[in-house]
Image: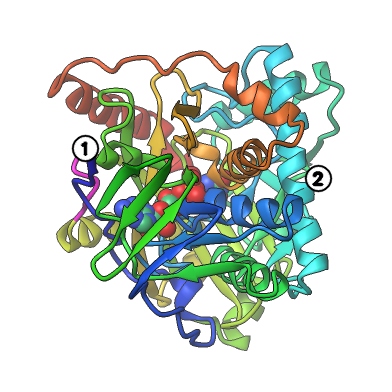
Amino acid sequence: MIRVRRQPIDTGVSGWQDVLPPRAPSPPLGEAITADLLIIGGGFAGLAALRRFNECEPEASAVLLDASAIGDGPSGRNSGFMIDLPHDLASSDYGGSRDRDRLVIAQNREAVAFALAQRDTLAMPSEAVQAVGKVNGAATEKGVRHNTDYAAHLASLDEFSERLDARAMRDLTGTDYYLDGLYTPGTAMLQPALYNRLLADGTVAASGGRCRLFEHSGVSELARAGGDWCARTNRGQVTAPSVILAVNGHAASFGFYPRQLLHVFTYAGMTRALSDRELRSLGGQVRWSLTPSDPMGTTVRRVDGTGGARIVVRNRFTCDPSMEIDNARLVRVARTLRTSFVRRFPTLKAVGMEYVWGGRLCLSWNGVSAFSEPQPGLHLAVCQNGLGAARGTLAGIAAAERVARVNSALATHLEAEEELKTLPPEPVATLGANAVMRWNEFRAGREL
Ligand SMILES: Cc1cc2nc3c(=O)[nH]c(=O)nc-3n(C[C@H](O)[C@H](O)[C@H](O)COP(=O)(O)OP(=O)(O)OC[C@H]3O[C@@H](n4cnc5c(N)ncnc54)[C@H](O)[C@@H]3O)c2cc1C
């Protein structure tokens, strides 16, 4: 029997969730039920699995349990870049080997196509998912060189990209902070909390009662029960022949991949809604999305959906094997977020961050995800590295296709990934990871 060691804790209120109209979460599980499939975890991976399973097996029943409310966890509190291109946070220019990159691009585009198809089928507003691309912004000469290398790497893969000079970057963003940009068209931009909410509620509604969702229903035990699996929560239990565990780094709390998962937090801030006067003083386009040319730099978005026109920034990485951070950490990180914001937008220095929050990433030492069936009927779709919007979605689709026994090239590819490398022993792994990240953040200079 697996006793789950820790339940997830999401620190700080995410602006993406809070600016939306209130949504009543589904009631917690309060009885003993059965289903054909149990999914644990309602982020990108779990929700894609639920939707895909229902597409493959419309008559079968599925239950999804999440420890928190849909949209509160990492999938609802990220920066919303569903990136189609290679985006290896550990490399200097996001790229990898050419063959692997081609495969990753084809797969990531399946995730983007899935999200866009869900938007159309489930009648989501365009704010939830938009196929608008992104720009890799460079604020230093080193960043410009990264963009040059990245553009060459993309050209060698026959991938389109367009260079933006400092003036074009100012026309886009309203700030003259950036020297250069590299636009690529294939990234889908999400309002992540909205997308996750609508994917969850839309899947349940479209399934005619066959898919059921229980929020605030953390699984505390998972055990074999005859040929089935039985998951217990505080007040209920679900018995099913197949389980998809889609909890990303919390796979470690279920005892899987000991010493192979690196638990990292990253942090975001969202301004209050900008006034018309502030928007006029800023200039630029109404909506844009920048990743930093240096992976340790600052991600910036300007959004104009529900909640008004706001700027969202994300930076800093910390390694926390406890998978928890406290408010004191948020207070410290908020200073860096604010500095990065004011440096870029000095005319908005009076504008505060209405929201600051942190969230979990799960990385492996060798950048691969964990997709496996360690025991019959128990499927793991975890460890999405820095690209969970796309990779989590794919892992969820692939796991559902395995359970539904449909031919799945995606699942075959994910199963063929190399093994996750074992991390150095503690405290070396955590100290080492934090030291490397601090050093790389320092070296990122004005990109941070
Ligand atoms: C600030 C920030 C910005 C980011 N920006 C981006 C970005 O722009 N693009 C990108 O691709 N990625 C980004 N990420 C990473 C991305 O959010 C994650 O990789 C992604 O959320 C992983 O998806 P997932 O479904 O695998 O796991 P999660 O989103 O972590 O979902 C797992 C779910 O499992 C639930 N759970 C855990 N334990 C239990 C249990 N015992 N019982 C029941 N439920 C449980 C959790 O509540 C959670 O909802 C960002 C992350 C953060 C924090």
From the viewer's side, name the closer residue of 3 and 297.
3
Q: Which numbered disc covers residue 26?
A: none
Mark 1 residue type? Pro
Q: Secondary structure at mark 2?
A: loop
- Residue 274 makes an appearance in the image: yes
Q: x, y (%) of residue 33?
A: 42, 66
Identify the image quadrant of residue 432: top left
Q: Secondary structure at mark 1?
A: loop
In this view, 439 is above or below 46: above
Residues rendered magenta in the picture: 321-325
Mark 2 residue type? Pro
Q: Residue at x 44, y 35 (%)?
A: 383
Q: CA distance from mark 2 to mark 1?
A: 36 Å
Q: x, y (%) of residue 4?
A: 23, 47
From the viewer's side, name the closer residue of 311 and 377.
377
- Residue on which the image places disc 2: 185
Q: x, y (%) of residue 131?
A: 79, 55
- Residue 317 makes an appearance in the image: no
Q: Residue at x 57, y 31 (%)?
A: 143
From the viewer's side, name the closer residue of 133 and 30.
30
Reading the chain from its start, which is encountered first: label 2 or label 1? 2
Instruction: Tell me if 427 is positioned left or right of 333 in this view.
Output: left
Identify the image quadrant of residue 25: bottom left
From the viewer's side, name the closer residue of 366 and 158.
366
